[in-house]
C-alpha cells in the first residue's frame, strides 16, 4: 500500500528539500512543502520531481508565525493533498549574535518560528495523524522535528537559538507522551552546522536519519535519533 502524503514545514535548499526528495524516491507520491518564499518553493519542488517524476509536489507560501493564516493554510493543504501520514517540522532561524547586542524582538522571533509554528502544526495535524492510526493500523503516522545538539550543549554565539530549540524539544517530548503508541513523534538531533561539505551533517545524510525513523516498527519507535555526534 502506498504511503499517505508527506508535509514538510520549513522547506529549503538543505535539509528541508533533501528529506522530501528521499521520501519521494521511496514511494511518497504526494508531497506538500511550506515556506515563506514562493521562489524557494518552486526550486525545491523541481529538485524533488527531478529525482522522482511520479511525485506531485504542492507548495504553500506561508509564515509559520502567522498563527491563523498558517493554520488555515495547513487546512487548505489537507483539503487539496489529503491528510498526511508523515509531517516534518524543519522551520527555524539561525542568527549569530553576541549577548547584549541582540534585541528582544529578535529573541522573540527566534522562539516563535520553532515553537509557535510547531504548536500550530500539532494543533491542526496531530488529530488527523491520530485518526489515521486508529483507522489504518498498518500506516505509520508520524511527526518528526529537526533538532540540534545545542539543546544539550548551548553555545553563546547562537544562545537565542539554543533557548528556542530547548523549548521546542520540550514541546516535542510532551507531544510524544500525549500520542504514545498512536503517532510516532520524534526528534532528529543534528550534531553541528549543516553543509554539503560536512561528512556527517550534510543534507543527504540527515535525510537518511528521518527515513530510518520512518522505517522503525511500531513498538520499537525511538523518540530521538542523532546525526553527527
Image: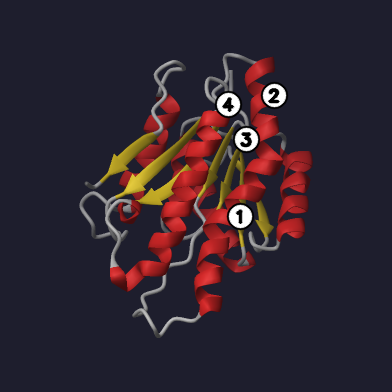
In the rendered image, which residue does mark 4 sit on?
3
Give the spatial CA distance, label 3 vs label 2: 15 Å
**Which labelled disc corresponds to residue 215?**
none
Colour theme: secondary structure
On the image, numbered disc 2 is attached to which residue?
131
Q: Which mark is residue 5?
A: 3
Q: Which of pointers 4 and 1 indicates the residue nearer the eye?
A: 1
Q: Is residue 228 left or right of residue 174?
A: left
- Which numbered mark, 3 or 2, is in the foreground of this view? 2
Q: Between marks 4 and 1, how big is the CA–CA gap?
A: 25 Å
In space, the residues marked 1 and 2 are separated at their CA atoms by 22 Å
Q: Which residue is mark 1?
A: 117
**Which residue extends farthest bottom?**
101
Nearest the eye: 95 or 29: 95
Quadrant in which residue 187 is drawn: top left
- Are there few (<14), some (14-19), or many (20+) residues within 10 Å of tag 1? many
Give x and y (percent) for residue 140: 54, 23
Amino acid at each position: 500500500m502506498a504511503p499517505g502524503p508527506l508535509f514538510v514545514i520549513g522547506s529549503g535548499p538543505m535539509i528541508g528539500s533533501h528529506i522530501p526528495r528521499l521520501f519521494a524516491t521511496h514511494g511518497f507520491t504526494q508531497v506538500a512543502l511550506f515556506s515563506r518564499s514562493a521562489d524557494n518553493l518552486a526550486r525545491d519542488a523541481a529538485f524533488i520531481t527531478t529525482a522522482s517524476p511520479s511525485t506531485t509536489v504542492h507548495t504553500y507560501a506561508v509564515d509559520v508565525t502567522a498563527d491563523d493564516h498558517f493554520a488555515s493554510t495547513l487546512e487548505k493543504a489537507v483539503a487539496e493533498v489529503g491528510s498526511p501520514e508523515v509531517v516534518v517540522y524543519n522551520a527555524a532561524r539561525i542568527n549569530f549574535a553576541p549577548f547584549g547586542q541582540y534585541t528582544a524582538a529578535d529573541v522573540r522571533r527566534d522562539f516563535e518560528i520553532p515553537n509557535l509554528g510547531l504548536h500550530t502544526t500539532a494543533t491542526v495535524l496531530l488529530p488527523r495523524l491520530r485518526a489515521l492510526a486508529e483507522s489504518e493500523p498498518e500506516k505509520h503516522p508520524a511527526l518528526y522535528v529537526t533538532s540540534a545538539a545545542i539543546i544539550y550543549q548551548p553555545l553563546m554565539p547562537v544562545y537565542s537559538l539554543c533557548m528556542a530549540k530547548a523549548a521546542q524539544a520540550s514541546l516535542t517530548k510532551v507531544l510524544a507522551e500525549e500520542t504514545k503508541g498512536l503517532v510516532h513523534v520524534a526528534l532528529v538531533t543534528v550534531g553541528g552546522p549543516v553543509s554539503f561539505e560536512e561528512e556527517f551533517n550534510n543534507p543527504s545524510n540527515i535525510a537518511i536519519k528521518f527515513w530510518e525513523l520512518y522505517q522503525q516498527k511500531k513498538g520499537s519507535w525511538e523518540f530521538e535519533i542523532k546525526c553527527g555526534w
